[in-house]
């Protein structure tokens, strides 16, 4: 089982020097990957609360904001050699699928195949609508956009006629380094998310899940595979971010469930917090070996 870190970099703490040093230290500690969340904008009032916190708000430093995933991973790719980079998760239904396909295959190309494309439909209604899309049909739109991207990554010339996307004889190059394409890692806990994980995914990503909850979700994932007339293969990646309070001895429980990667939440990004937390996460590498 491999160990990574979830670190959504936020200004003003996440300076270029901080991010560069963090990537190099993570690589030196033997970590497998850095995963990063995505929101292009935040709102003072939301219809639905952020599911990752008790008060429903994303903990952002005063006067700060979340850095862009694509630019940050490109910066980190230039500062490291082995680390993988995972979007946790890219909000596909509010993105332009052609731009996204181009951005991700360029990242894969420039990082020499070190990208995992974690995807989800999102929770922030205001953000989806501000990006020019309807909230209610984001699931169906996600499926169509994923199909567009998958074809652009794998076919030399693509014709596509869908509900949201239409084009003829389109070429998108360079193709991703990874074959058949960048791994799509599907996040989410609804039945539709598990169906999407079976249809499009090379893996499934669960956030803030303890061992018991992970076991419950894997049962649902396997049921979705069975419904599709398939069985989950050993190579199908299971990636989990545990609760930040996860005890060290919980690693064995994840391993027994067949989890491939545990992506531990960094938490705060103040220098003293990083100095304390990063060695703790690094020590899990030996436990997981």
Image: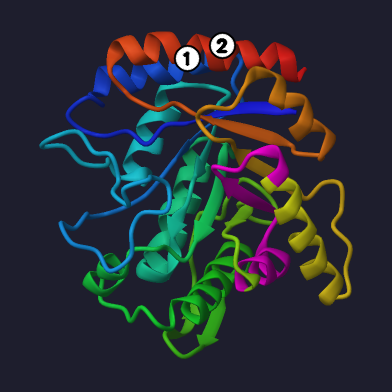
The x, y position of residue 78, in whole percent, is: 41, 26
| Residue in the foreground of this view, choosing between 80 and 289 | 289
* Furthest residue toward left: 63
Q: Residue at x 52, y 27 (%)?
A: 245
Q: Secondary structure at mark 1?
A: helix
In terms of image quadrants, where is residue 287? Answer: top right
Residue 199 on the magenta span: yes
Start and end of the magenta stretch? 192-212
The x, y position of residue 285, in whole percent, is: 67, 16
Q: Residue at x 55, y 69 (%)?
A: 146
| Residue in the foreground of this view, choosing between 77 and 128 | 128
Residue 264 on the magenta span: no
- Looking at the rendered structure, which numbered label has been put on residue 239? none
The x, y position of residue 68, in whole percent, is: 30, 45
Q: Residue at x 44, y 26 (%)?
A: 266
| Residue in the foreground of this view, choosing between 25 and 281 | 281
- Looking at the rendered structure, which numbered label has been put on residue 278? 1
Q: Earlier in the sequence, mark 1 or mark 2?
A: 2
The x, y position of residue 162, in whole percent, is: 50, 89
Residue at mark 1 to residue at mark 2: CA–CA distance: 8 Å
Q: Secondary structure at mark 2?
A: loop
In terms of image quadrants, where is residue 158? Answer: bottom right
Find out whether the residues at labels 1 and 2 contact each other: C-beta distance under 8 Å: yes
In terms of image quadrants, where is residue 243? Answer: top right
Left or right of residue 201, residue 282 in this image: left
Q: Residue at x 63, y 64 (%)?
A: 154
Q: Which residue was labeled with disc 2?
A: 29
Callout 2: few (<14), some (14-19), or many (20+) C-alpha neighbours within 10 Å? Answer: some
Depicted 165 relative to depicted 102: above or below: below
Depicted 182 relative to depicted 80: above or below: below
Q: Nearer the viewer, mark 1 or mark 2?
A: 1
């Amino acid at each position: 089982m491999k160990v990574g870190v979830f670190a959504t970099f936020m200004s003003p703490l996440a300076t270029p020097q901080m991010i560069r040093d963090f990537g190099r230290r993570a690589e030196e500690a033997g970590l497998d990957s850095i995963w990063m969340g995505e929101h292009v904008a935040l709102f003072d009032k939301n219809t639905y609360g952020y599911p990752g916190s008790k008060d429903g708000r994303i903990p952002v430093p005063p006067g700060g904001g979340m850095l862009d995933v694509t630019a940050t991973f490109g910066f980190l790719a230039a500062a490291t050699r082995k680390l993988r980079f995972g979007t946790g998760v890219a909000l596909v239904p509010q993105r332009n699928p052609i731009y996204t396909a181009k951005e991700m295959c360029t990242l894969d190309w420039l990082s020499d195949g070190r990208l995992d494309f974690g995807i989800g439909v999102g929770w922030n209604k205001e953000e989806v609508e501000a990006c020019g899309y309807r909230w209610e049909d984001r699931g169906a739109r996600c499926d169509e956009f994923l199909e567009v991207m998958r074809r652009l990554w794998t076919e030399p010339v693509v014709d596509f006629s869908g509900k949201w996307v239409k084009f003829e004889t389109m070429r998108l190059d360079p193709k991703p380094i990874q074959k058949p394409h960048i791994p799509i890692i599907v996040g989410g806990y609804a039945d539709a998310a598990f169906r999407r994980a079976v249809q499009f995914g090379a893996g499934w990503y669960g956030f803030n899940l303890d061992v018991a909850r992970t076991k419950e979700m894997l049962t649902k994932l396997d049921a979705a595979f069975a419904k599709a007339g398939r069985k989950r293969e050993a190579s199908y990646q299971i990636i989990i971010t545990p609760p930040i309070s996860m005890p060290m001895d919980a690693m064995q429980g994840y391993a027994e469930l067949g989890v491939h990667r545990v992506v531990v939440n960094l938490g705060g990004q103040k220098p003293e917090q990083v100095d304390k937390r990063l060695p703790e996460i690094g020590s899990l590498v030996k436990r997981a070996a």
